[in-house]
Image: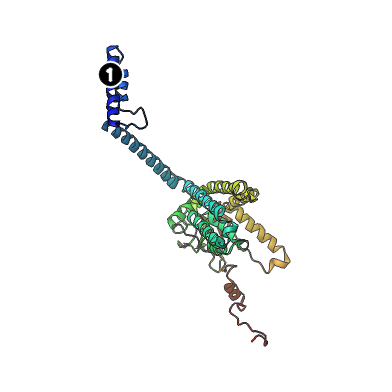
Amino acid sequence: MPSRLNAFIFISRHIDATVALSAGLPMSTLQRLAFRGRRPKYPWQPRFLSSKTTSTRLGIYARRTTYTVAALGAVWTVDNLFNASALSRNIRTLWTCAAITLDYKINFTPEKSDLIPQLHERVATRMYNLFTSNGGLYIKIGQAIGANAMFLPKPMQAKFAKLFDNAPQIPYATIDKVFQSELGRPPDGPGGVFEIFEEQAVASASIAQVHRAKLWPQPGDTEEKWVAVKIQKPDVATQMEWDLAAFRAVMWMFEKWAFDLPVYFAVDFISDHLRQELDFVNEANNARKTAEFVAGEPRLANKVYIPKVYPEYSTKKVMTAEWIEGVRLSDRSAICALMGEPNPAESPVSLPPSWA
């Protein structure tokens, strides 16, 4: 039955075209009438498409796909080469925060209370991966959270504690470019700022890394003077405003839409302080003021020492200070050894006789 109906419709359309031709209608109208025979008038009728029409549509879809892929590739390349991957970092941030929000919305319920530890573990892993993948300012934000981790679930405490380890170092060639752009001379060698500049960094943090260097000897010097040269990572300044914009958007989402948490009020305060951390001249001035304060306070003068800062070798992205051997405040064993005191963790515990 359908085949007979299609044949009838096809013949009727061509009869319409013949009548139109005898009536003197233009060719464009005749072409539309002839093509109508290939389009079904009712849903149950099959659609007739010529091979030429099909190939034309496939070509259109192929071109659209090619243009889309090319445009996305161009955006990614420009973002990666000229924008320090700031856009990609923001997309990764928003995607991760959306996943965390949905996970809590779906699984943080009284009915699933026995699965909440696994939920915290998933969220901690997502946040840790986000911070370490993006690096830079994200490491510093994670360290700020880790410093107050006592208020967080155990899985988050364990994950954020790892953020205090050394961050990845950037190549010395990049450090050399930053140094010369700031001070106008190479770090060492003929005409260099320092007599010796160690290419291997002694420490790497979220926004900068530190290299050990030796000053040129001056008349009257009786000993070598070694300094710590703190050099800002070049991508941080480019990424800063993008990262802070993503931080603002996430805090707004958590307060206004996701969790009703009062967190947005702190955005401006945190953003201003993070911007100030990129200005090493400001940091050098703070060190100098702190040294003056300590020297003028009798209770601290002989107990606290602030390393000397060398302003002639310091700029907004490079800061040079006196080299002082030290240990981390979180390394209890090293602090006890430095102070010549026994480590309580290694001392045997003497129990009362009644407990023995």
The residue closer to the viewer here, 32 or 76, is 32
Q: Quadrant of residue 340?
A: bottom right
Task: Tell me which residue sits at (66%, 57%) in the image.
Answer: 289
The x, y position of residue 204, in whole percent, is 51, 60
* Image quadrant occupied by the N terminus: top left
Residue 342 appears left or right of 180: right
The spot of residue 141 in percent (x, y) is 57, 55
On the rendered image, what quadrant is the C terminus found in? bottom right
Q: How many numbered circles are shown?
A: 1
Disc 1 is placed on an element classified as helix
User: What residue is at 70 percent from the left and 66 percent from the top?
Assistant: 300
Residue type (three-letter) at the residue carrying disc 1: Ile
Within 10 Å of disc 1 (Cα), the crowding (few <14, some 14-19, many 20+) is some
Pick the front one: 307 or 218: 307
Q: Nearer the viewer, residue 51 or 338?
A: 51
Q: Is residue 254 at least partly visible in the picture?
A: yes
Q: Is residue 336 above or below residue 82?
A: below
In the picture as drawn, the residue positioned furthest to the top comes out as 23
Asked whether residue 144 is in view, the answer is no
Q: In the image, what residue occupies the spot 38% across and 42% down?
A: 69
- Residue 7 position (above or below residue 132): above
| Residue that carries the numbered disc 1 in the rendered image | 15
Q: Residue at x 55, y 63 (%)?
A: 155
